[in-house]
Image (cartoon, rainbow, N blue to C red):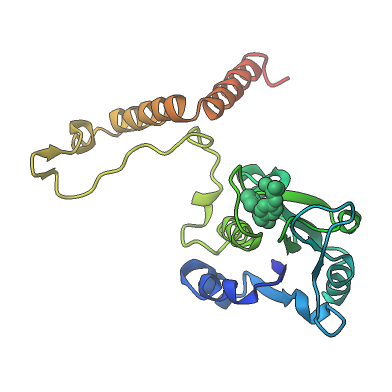
Amino acid sequence: MKIDIITIFPGMFDSVLNASILKRAVDKKKLKVKIHYLRDFAEGKHLQVDDSPYGGGCGMVMKLEPILKCLKSIRGAKKAKKLILTPAGSLFDQAAAVELSKEKQIVLLCGHYEGYDERVVKFFDGELSIGDYVLTGGELPAMVIVDAIARLIPGVLGNEDSAKQDSFMDGLLDCPHYTKPAIYKKMKVPEVLLSGNHKKINEWRMQEALERTRERRPALFKAKVGKEASKAENRKDGGI
Ligand code: 9D3
C-alpha cells in the first residue's frame, strides 16, 4: 500500500512515521508513505498556497493551482483513491478504514485555513473527517487514517488475523482487562477471571462489553443488536 500525503506542514509527519508499528510496516515494505510539500508547487515571489475568499469574509482559502500541480506530480495518482481531509467530510470510521485498506494507493490532501477552493473537489474521490471536533488542520487526521489503515494490512501486526477477525465482539467496546497482581491495595481482580472456567470467562467478557457499549455508545449498541438480530433471522430462514 502506498499513501501520498499533500501538506503545508511536512515536518509534522516525521516522528509518527519513524515510530513503532508504522516504522516497522514501512521497513517491512508493507507500507510506503510519501509526503508532498504543497509550497513546492506554488508560484510567484511569495509561493502563496492560500488567498482571500471571493465574496469576502475572514480567513484564507487554499488555492487551486498548487493542489492540482502537486496531484499531477504524484506517480500513480490517476488510479489512486484521492481524498480530501476536512471537518465537512463524511465520517472516517472502522468500516471506512477496512475499505481503504484494500486500496493499492491512496492520496490524502490535508485541509487548512478556512478550507480549499471548491473546484478541487472534482479531482478527488471524496472528503473525510475523523470526527466532530475542530483541529488546526488535516495533518493529524491524515496520520490517524494512515495508522488505522496500516494495522489492517496483512503482516503489519504480529498476530495477522486478530485485526480482521469477525467475531461477535466486533462493533462493541472492549471489555475490561486485568493483569498481575490479583490483589493490589485491597483492589481485587474479578473472581471469574481467576476461575479457569473459559466458558464463564467468555460470558463475563461479552456481558461487560455489551453493558459498556449500551451505556457509553447507545448508537453503536443499537446497530450491533440490530445486526445480530437480522443474522439470527437469516439463520432461521435457512440462509435466504
Ligand atoms: C468555521 C468553519 N471551520 C469548520 C468547523 C473551518 C475550519 C476549521 C478547522 C476548517 C478547517 C479546519 C482544520 N481541520 C481540518 O482540516 C480537518 C479536520 C478537523 O478539524 N476535525 C476532524 N477531522 C478533520 S479532517 C481535516
Q: Which residue is pictured at 22% across the width and 37% down the height?
A: 196
Q: Quadrant of the N terminus?
A: bottom right
Q: Nearer the viewer, residue 132 or 57?
A: 57
Q: Quadrant of the C terminus?
A: top right
Q: Nearer the viewer, residue 194 or 72?
A: 72
Whole-percent x and y of residue 22?
54, 68
* Residue 92 in sight: yes
Residue 76: image quadrant is bottom right
Q: Is residue 135 left or right of residue 35?
A: left
Whole-percent x and y of residue 61?
80, 60
Q: Nearer the viewer, residue 186 or 163?
A: 186
Q: Nearer the viewer, residue 161 or 143?
A: 143
Q: Which residue is pictured at 65% across the width and 43% down the height?
A: 95
Is residue 113 depicted above or below 188 in this figure? below
Residue 176: image quadrant is top left
Is residue 63 depicted above or below 88 in this figure? below
Whole-percent x and y of residue 142?
64, 61
Q: Is residue 215 left or right of residue 121?
A: left
Whole-percent x and y of residue 167?
51, 37
Q: Is residue 190 left or right of residue 155?
A: left
* Residue 99 in sight: no
Residue that extends furthest to the left in the rendered view of this protein: 186
Q: Which residue is pictured at 62% across the width and 14% down the height?
A: 236
Is residue 41 depicted above or below 238 in this figure? below
Label tally: 0
